[in-house]
Image: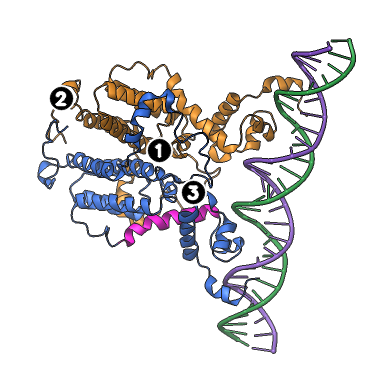
Chain colours: A orange, B blue, C green, D purple
Amino acid sequence: MRDDAEAARTGLDESRIVAAAVRFIDERGLRELTMRRLGAYLGVEGMALYRYLPGREALLDAVVESVVDALYRDPDVLLEAPAGWVDYLQRLAHGLRRIALTHPEVFPLVATRPAAAPWVRPPLRSLRGIESLLAVLTAAGFSDEHAAAVYRAFSSFLLGHLLLEVSALGVETGPVEEPDVAPAGDLDAYPILRRLEPTLSQDHAGADFEEALETLLDRIALLLPARRRGGRAALPRNGDQ
Amino acid sequence: MRDDAEAARTGLDESRIVAAAVRFIDERGLRELTMRRLGAYLGVEGMALYRYLPGREALLDAVVESVVDALYRDPDVLLEAPAGWVDYLQRLAHGLRRIALTHPEVFPLVATRPAAAPWVRPPLRSLRGIESLLAVLTAAGFSDEHAAAVYRAFSSFLLGHLLLEVSALGVETGPVEEPDVAPAGDLDAYPILRRLEPTLSQDHAGADFEEALETLLDRIALLLPARRRGGRAALPRNGDQ
DNA sequence: GATCGCCTGTTTATGCGGTAAACGGCCGGG
DNA sequence: CCCGGCCGTTTACCGCATAAACAGGCGATC
């Protein structure tokens, strides 16, 4: 059924399969992903994938790893030679945010798939990435305990903000949607919500992310002895409305 | 096949089904939940559930709603008559954390299921809850924009912290686990990780949550004119190590 | 250059999942 | 006493993940 011309284009391979899965999810959503459909997407029967992957779960793990590892291939992020811990955390945060926004259908997987070890905190899932983060922090003068605390705080920050940002993009809604009665028409019982609805619908994701990131960095800087803060976290001015 | 004695215990009902689903998930995990299995759990054929629910998705939605609404049935949370916005946010945060820890297998559902409206930010999923939150904030003197900003910041905070806390409980791991070679034995390539592993494995979730909550509340208080802050967010002392 | 074995993708088959539709018994009102 | 409707059951369908048997082409060996 499948002959020469097709076969040339085919040429399976784990990395090709995973890349196709990522594109498939980006295009059609995670819930559409099926072994058979991914096979068809690659011009192949579904069962062919099992020659390269043990099963569907392994495929999803590989998808997550592939997407997260893009951080270390991104020239803008270059996590290996950072100019100080602040710069490092900023690049890390922006790099992960870029990944989340590039693959909004994949990101929930990055965020919620069970981790390899209990201390691996999504969305920072790569051992190499965590090692690198902790190395930068301890080199910058954070104690082991503080480095661990920063890692925890940073991962919570990223998970909360990015998961909410991508979910606001309307990810994962089924194929056809039912406008039902009216879009957001049942707010009559909730007067404040009704009044604030336009305000709530405004997109502040970028600015919120930046502001929360800066605040977190300031808070982290306070863990360091004053002389090593690099100008960060001077006395906060009060009443800045 | 199923006769009198059994039938007496049966007596289906949407709320009974949803409650059973919550218990089922708590006991066996989300991935074990199946219409047929839930039926069996209730002493009934799987198809019987379809008389009360349109389908599996609707069941999951109802599970989420049921778990979240427990907030408003909890006498410790009493969100209707709060003593000030700080107290309100603290009760809300602690109430949700209690829910997350009581139903760790359900919480990822609360956190990631597509919301009814784009401005509904998990894990705060109930219109009533959001209305109440916004009412308290605006009554306390926050502008509409600030109230919305607080809502956004608070939901990000809760989502990040609670999702990570429950996922650290080892939720959703398959039935049998493969210790494979050794538990966390492949750290040889990551010396800092290896050194910090005991530190990272310590459980700081409760203290981290409290500290991040207090910090967030301080930051929120700065949005108010100084006279309305209720003693919160005085000038932060510097260098508190 | 012919043969053989392996690598790769295909076919076939099993069991389970969600769900539609037809079914049948029981119960309360006429 | 009958009958309609409510409720759970049965039967049936299709798609999914996956195991296992299969086939064809291609390169290595003689």
Q: Residue at x 52, y 31 (%)?
A: A63
Q: Nearer the viewer, mark 2 or mark 1?
A: 2
Q: Is the magenta region chiefly helix, strand or loop?
A: helix
Q: Closest to the observer: B144 or A208?
A: A208
Please indicate whether residue D10 sits to the left or right of residue C1 in the image.
left
Farthest-out residue, left: B227
Q: Chain of mark 1?
A: A
**Quadrant of the snapshot with the C terminus of chain A:** top left
**Quadrant of the snapshot with the N terminus of chain A:** top right
- Per the image, the residue denoted by label 3 is A179
Asked if residue A212 is positioned above or below residue A9 in the image, the reply reads below
Instruction: State which region is magenta.
Output: B56-74
**Callout 3: few (<14), some (14-19), or many (20+) C-alpha neighbours within 10 Å?**
few
**Callout 2: few (<14), some (14-19), or many (20+) C-alpha neighbours within 10 Å?**
some
In the rendered structure, which disc, 3 or 2, sits on the residue that comes first in sequence?
A: 3
Asked if residue B22 is positioned above or below residue A183 in the image, the reply reads below
Amino acid type of the residue tagged 3 in the rendering: Pro
Tell me which corner region of the image, top left, top right, bottom left or bottom right, holds residue A9: top right
Which mark, residue A216? none
Amino acid type of the residue tagged 1 in the rendering: Leu
Q: CA distance from mark 1 to mark 3?
A: 25 Å
Amino acid type of the residue tagged 2 in the rendering: Ala
Q: Chain of mark 3?
A: A
Task: Measuring from the top left, give residue A205's x and y in whole percent.
Answer: 34, 34
Which mark, residue A163? 1
Q: Nearer the viewer, mark 3 or mark 2?
A: 2
Q: Closest to the observer: A146 or A30?
A: A146
